[in-house]
Image (tube, coloured by chain):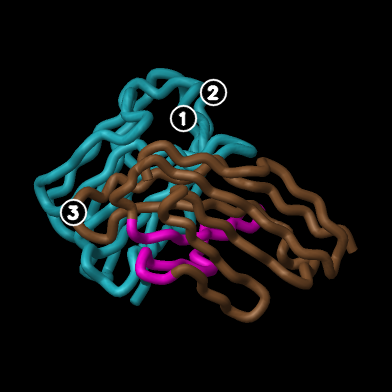
Chain colours: A brown, B cyan
Amino acid sequence: GENVEQHPSTLSVQEGDSAVIKCTYSDSASNYFPWYKQELGKRPQLIIDIRSNVGEKKDQRIAVTLNKTAKHFSLHITETQPEDSAVYFCAPSRMRGYQKVTFGTGTKLQVIP
Amino acid sequence: NAGVTQTPKFRILKIGQSMTLQCTQDMNHNYMYWYRQDPGMGLKLIYYSVGAGITDKGEVPNGYNVSRSTTEDFPLRLELAAPSQTSVYFCASTTPGSYTGELFFGEGSRLTVL
């Protein structure tokens, strides 16, 4: 990942709306692109990931899309629910070899009922 | 499997004291990490290790030391604690070449330095 940035830093949406969080990275050798969710007072946990040979992956209401050329990937949450409220982190890395895993700055998502 | 276990969960230190945060994993993971998370902030990498006997600095290593004598254990040592080290510390592990590079986290150790 090396230099990793996330946008936006905070996001408020109405319940049922969609949310999109973008992660940009500088290490062109990154080939593993995960998103972690951290609820208040808890540890970060993986919610979805994608490898560089795939452009998009979906798991129910969440999806991740990858643009390796532009070096960014995004988390998409549809039909948001109050339990989606949390901080989300990206952490692009290489699956082999060099393994200094740097996290993005985080996005605090608030879903308003 | 217990996964990644951290101890203690909470600790209060006085300025200048030293302590060790313990981290052990039972998943036979080669790679282990220490992160700190200040209130309302992101995860900053302190140190990491790619195997027994091998450690390297992360983004914020000053004031900390680590060792990795076994695959399972990766303790983090704080020398001469300072208020700036008040934070939540997370240990994590993964294994190279697996289907995913998912990091497995411990529950965290909340440290307050007064």
Give the Cα distance between marks 1 and 3. 37 Å
- Could you tell me which residue is drawn at 37 percent across and 72 percent down? B2
Task: Give SS at disc 3.
Answer: loop
Q: Secondary structure at mark 1?
A: strand
Whether pointer 1 and pointer 2 mark residues with C-beta atoms closer than 8 Å, the reply is yes
| Disc 1 to disc 2, C-alpha distance | 6 Å
Image quadrant in which you'd find residue B78: top left
Q: Chain of mark 3?
A: A
Can you give x and y, in whole percent of width and height, for residue A48 in the image? Answer: 51, 69
Label 2: how many residues lie within 10 Å, few (<14), some (14-19) or many (20+)? some
**Residue beneath the point at 43% across and 59% down:** A33
Near-viewer residue (A53 or A79): A53
Spot the residue most to the front: A69
Q: Which residue is mark 2?
A: B114
Image: magenta residue range: A31-54
Is residue A95 or residue A68 the one in the foreground? A68
Q: Amino acid at mark 1?
A: Leu
Label number found at residue B13: 1
Q: Which mark is residue A8?
A: none
Residue at numbered disc 3: A97
Q: Position of residue A87 (x, y in %)?
A: 64, 52
Q: Is residue A67 magenta?
A: no
Q: Give the letter of the chain under mark 1.
A: B
